[in-house]
Image: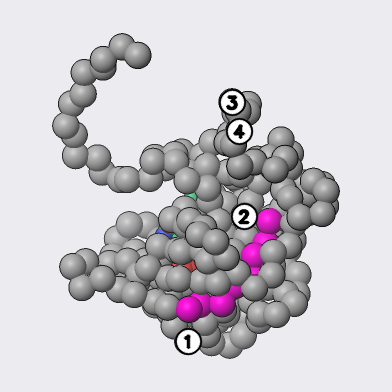
């Protein structure tokens, strides 16, 4: 491969391309909040989330340690963007207000999304999302070196998938599953398959 020159820059953001999730959490009045996030990763049966301390999601998770990690298909990007400038937190924190956020109580309505009852947690599942993961919060850690974000460790309790993306009994068909990628604040789908790892069972 050709040696390419690099340049040191100070990127304004570090969103280098991860799947969008829509996190549903329980409000104090037992309605549901939806928070778009892109900071998540899975390890075994655990999913780690990066959640702002300023938003409603963290407040809800601290009070009620359950959530659903709903993973939208790339075709749902406009629904995600409909939610992007809203917070379920009232009053809107000063910094969020300065960044252009306003309060929204009913995010399902705002995002043209549909709630469905979960099996084992109180927050609802988003019916339109092909993957919906009911999860329990195991730990919330706000690093002392920077108190802006919380690292939220969750454990998957139940994994739901649209039948259209399931292959065999317990696999997701990667040909049929197209997550929505948040790439430096732009939405992308994924392209064609390039290959697969030696451990792939599909
Ligand atoms: C595509 C997308 C990805 C986002 N990723 C994150 C994230 O990983 N962590 C986070 O705290 N906020 C993230 N945000 C910002 C939150 O969605 C925003 O703070 C929102 O107000 C949270 O809603 P809430 O305050 O009702 O929880 C993202 C927003 C969008 C649109």
Name which of mark 2 and mark 3 comes first in the sequence: 2
Name which residue lies at 60% across and 28% down.
Answer: 195
The secondary element bearing badge 4 is classed as: loop
- List x then y, in percent, for residue 136: 56, 77
Q: Residues within 10 Å of mark 3 (few under 14, many from 20)?
A: few
- 93 vs 178: above or below: below
Q: Earlier in the sequence, mark 1 or mark 4?
A: 1
Query: Residue 194, labelled with which disc?
Result: 3
Q: Nearer the viewer, mark 2 or mark 3?
A: 3
Residue 88 in view, yes or no: no
* Res 7 → quadrant: top left
What's the magenta region? 131-138
At 57% across and 65% down in the image, what residue appears?
A: 45
Q: Earlier in the sequence, mark 3 or mark 1?
A: 1
Q: Secondary structure at mark 3?
A: loop
Closer-to-camera residue (78/139): 139
Predominant SS of the magenta segment = strand
Report x, y in % for residue 156. 60, 69
Instruction: Find the distance from the CA under tag 3 to the CA under tag 1.
Output: 43 Å
What residue does disc 2 label?
71
Give the answer, above or below, for where 4 lies relative to 69: above
Q: Earlier in the sequence, mark 2 or mark 4?
A: 2
Residue 72 seen: yes
Q: Is residue 143 left or right of residue 117?
A: left
Q: Secondary structure at mark 2?
A: strand
* Disc on res. 63: 1
Q: Return the residue nearer the eye: 120 or 3.
A: 3
- Is ligand 1 within 8 Å of the beta carbon of the residue shown at mark 1? no
**Would residue 21 be found to the left or right of residue 133 on screen?**
left
Q: Nearer the viewer, mark 2 or mark 4?
A: 4
Tag of residue 196: 4
Closest to the camera, between mark 4 and mark 3, is 4
């Amino acid at each position: 491969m050709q040696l390419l020159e690099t340049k040191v820059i100070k990127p304004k953001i570090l969103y280098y391309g991860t799947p969008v999730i829509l996190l549903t959490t329980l409000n104090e009045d037992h309605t549901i909040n939806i928070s778009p996030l892109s900071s998540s990763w899975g390890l075994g049966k655990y999913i780690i989330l990066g959640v702002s301390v300023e938003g409603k999601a963290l407040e809800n998770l601290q009070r009620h340690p359950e959530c659903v990690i709903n993973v939208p298909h790339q075709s749902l990007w406009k629904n995600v963007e409909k939610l992007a400038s809203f917070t379920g937190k009232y009053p809107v924190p000063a910094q969020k207000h300065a960044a252009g956020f306003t309060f929204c109580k009913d995010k399902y309505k705002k995002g043209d999304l549909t709630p469905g009852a979960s099996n084992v947690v109180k927050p609802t599942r988003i019916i339109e999302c092909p993957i919906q993961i009911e999860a329990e919060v195991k730990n919330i850690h706000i690093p002392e070196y920077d108190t802006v974000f919380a690292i939220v460790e969750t454990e998957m309790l139940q994994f739901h998938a649209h039948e259209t993306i399931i292959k065999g009994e317990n696999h997701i068909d990667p040909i049929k599953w197209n997550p929505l990628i948040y790439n430096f604040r732009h939405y992308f789908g994924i392209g064609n398959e390039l290959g697969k790892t030696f451990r792939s069972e599909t």
